[in-house]
């Protein structure tokens, strides 16, 4: 498969290695540091583009993929509040977008565990719930996209929580997400249920970026020749 990388930073490099190991060709690398363009024949020859850039760049890059008729897998976080806008544009252009806040298989198992635990804890009002996410200091968005996905599932399952807030809980229905930025931490997410009697917590700790990158390449393989909006549940049902 011909793959175009949009964003050739930490994730772009990791994805390139895995894509080549899996027998794909990288036909274009669009980044602030390269000369490749969306208009080039090389980019237009891509079967799928994989976009990992920054929150303020993702939407425009996805639009460029729709214009070029290239399906796009996007892992950039920090812009998901505009997802419904871009989905409408995807429909009007008959495009293809696969988006996930986290492509790692382990994190997606953790998503299922999180939802199950929230459902289990729903009747037990003595437990309050909070979340901590830790990432490297270069990360631009907070809370992380993964933390927001986790929070959205908890809010769906737990009647006593109706919205997430950054850092400090002020109302009982708020779910506080603390974001810590330190060193080169690749991504830690912990959900904590706390009563006067005890603490129950679940935690995911990424050991490398390979899990994110492998998931993104699998998503690209899955996206090839498909139309519409796709996500990790579609991919996991297929694996
Ligand atoms: N969904 C997932 O599984 C994961 C998502 N991420 C997200 O992916 C994004 C990128 O992460 P990293 O690779 O670690 O960041 P990075 O900072 O190492 O790389 C970003 C690259 O994008 C380039 N860039 C910036 N603006 C651009 C533009 N307008 N067009 C093209 N390229 C542009 C930069 O020059 C840089 O090389 C972040 O939003 C991060 O949160 C990161 C890991 C996993
Ligand atoms: O910026 C990162 O590094 C990561 N971002 C994603 C997020 O915001 O959830 C996924 C992973 O945690 C790494």
Image: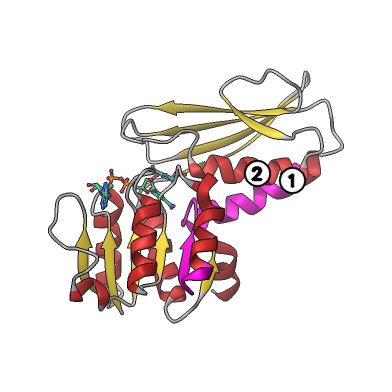
The residue range painted magenta reads 91-118
Residue furthest to the front? 92
Q: Is residue 204 left or right of residue 113?
A: left
Q: Residue at x 41, y 55 (%)?
A: 212
Q: Could you say which quadrant of the image residue 1 lies in? A: bottom left
Some atom of ligand 2 lies within 8 Å of the CB belonging to the residue at label 2? no
The picture places residue 140, in percent across and down from the top left corner, at 37, 35
Name the residue that disc number 2 marks: 152
Q: Is residue 191 left or right of residue 33?
A: right
Q: Is residue 29 left or right of residue 132?
A: left
Label 1, secondary structure: give it.
Answer: helix
Seen from the viewer's position, the closer of residues 172 and 79 is: 79
Some atom of ligand 2 lies within 8 Å of the CB belonging to the residue at label 1? no
Q: Is residue 218 left or right of residue 230?
A: left
Name the residue that disc number 1 marks: 156
The picture places residue 227, in percent across and down from the top left corner, at 50, 76
Seen from the viewer's position, the closer of residues 232 and 214 is: 232
Q: Residues within 10 Å of mark 1 (few under 14, many from 20)?
A: some
Seen from the viewer's position, the closer of residues 168 and 67 is: 67
Looking at the picture, does residue 227 appear above or below residue 185? below
Looking at the picture, does residue 47 appear above or below residue 165? below
- Label 2–label 1 contact, CB within 8 A: yes
The picture places residue 11, in percent across and down from the top left corner, at 31, 52
Seen from the viewer's position, the closer of residues 87 and 170 is: 87
Q: Mark 2 to mark 1: distance in Å?
A: 6 Å
Looking at the picture, does residue 130 appear above or below residue 187? above
Q: Could you say which quadrant of the image residue 21 lies in? A: bottom left
Looking at the picture, does residue 76 appear above or below residue 199? below
Q: How is the image coloured?
A: secondary structure
């Amino acid at each position: 498969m011909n793959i175009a990388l949009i964003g050739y930073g930490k994730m772009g490099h990791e994805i390139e290695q895995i894509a080549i190991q899996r027998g794909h060709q990288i036909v274009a690398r669009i980044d602030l540091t390269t000369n490749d363009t969306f208009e080039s024949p090389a980019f237009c020859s891509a079967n799928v583009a994989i976009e990992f850039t920054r929150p303020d760049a993702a939407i425009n890059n996805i639009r460029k993929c729709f214009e070029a008729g290239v399906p796009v897998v996007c892992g950039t976080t920090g812009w998901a509040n505009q997802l419904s806008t871009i989905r409408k544009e995807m429909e009007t252009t008959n495009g293809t977008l696969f988006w996930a806040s986290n492509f790692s298989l382990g994190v997606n198992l953790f998503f299922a565990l999180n939802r199950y635990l929230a459902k289990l804890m729903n009747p037990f009002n003595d437990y309050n719930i909070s979340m901590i996410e830790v990432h490297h200091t270069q990360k631009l968005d907070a809370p992380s996209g993964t933390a927001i996905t986790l929070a959205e599932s908890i809010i769906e399952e737990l009647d006593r929580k109706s919205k997430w807030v950054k850092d400090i809980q002020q109302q009982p229905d708020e779910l506080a997400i603390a974001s810590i930025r330190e060193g080169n931490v690749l991504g830690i997410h912990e959900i904590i249920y706390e009563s006067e009697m005890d603490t129950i917590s679940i935690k995911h700790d990424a050991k490398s970026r390979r899990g994110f990158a492998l998931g993104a390449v699998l998503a690209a393989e899955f996206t090839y020749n498909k139309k519409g909006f796709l996500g990790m549940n579609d991919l996991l049902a297929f694996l």
